[in-house]
Amino acid sequence: GNQVLGLSLDTSLFFYASWNTVSGATDYEVQLLKNGSWVTEGTSTTYYLWVSKQNSDTNYTFRVRAKNSTENSAWSNQLNISLPVTGP
């Protein structure tokens, strides 16, 4: 099934994207929508990723997929985040 994305914490330079972990996955690839294209922001081995804020942007769109040595999951539904968000 699709991972559920969420935002937990917002700081001045970064924010924190999180998701539900998937059995059998070793890594999670996170993509950010930039100028209409999906760009890989980073890969995490746990349930969250710190993401650098993009200049003064306050709206972000993410997706994530689970990976292991042999396969990748489908991309999750995209999530739109508006900053600032107080958490958790």
Image (cartoon, grey):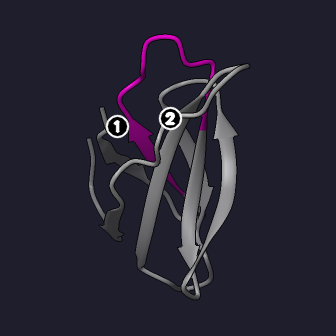
Q: Quadrant of the N terminus?
A: top left
Q: Which residue sits at x=47%, y=28%?
A: 47
Q: Which residues are magenta?
A: 15-28
Residue 5's spot in the image, x, y percent?
Answer: 33, 45
**Mark 1: few/some/many CA within 10 Å (<14, 14-19, 20+):** many
Mark seen at residue 62: none
Q: Is residue 26 magenta?
A: yes
C-beta proximity under 8 Å, tags 1 and 2: yes
Residue 54's spot in the image, x, y percent?
Answer: 61, 77
Q: Is residue 71 visible?
A: yes
Q: Is residue 44 magenta?
A: no
Disc 1 is placed on an element classified as loop
Q: Is residue 84 visible?
A: no
Residue 41's spot in the image, x, y percent?
Answer: 67, 57
Disc 2 is placed on an element classified as loop
Q: Which residue sits at x=27%, y=55%?
A: 86
Residue 37's spot in the image, x, y percent?
Answer: 60, 79
Marks 1, 2: nearer the viewer: 2
Name the residue carrying label 1: 3
Q: On the rendered structure, is 8 left or right of 49?
A: left
Task: Point out the residue furthest to the front here.
Answer: 70
Q: Compared with residue 40, is residue 81 higher up or lower down, i.e. above or below? A: below
Number of marks: 2
Q: Amino acid at mark 1?
A: Gln
Q: Amino acid at mark 2?
A: Ser
Name the residue carrying label 2: 73
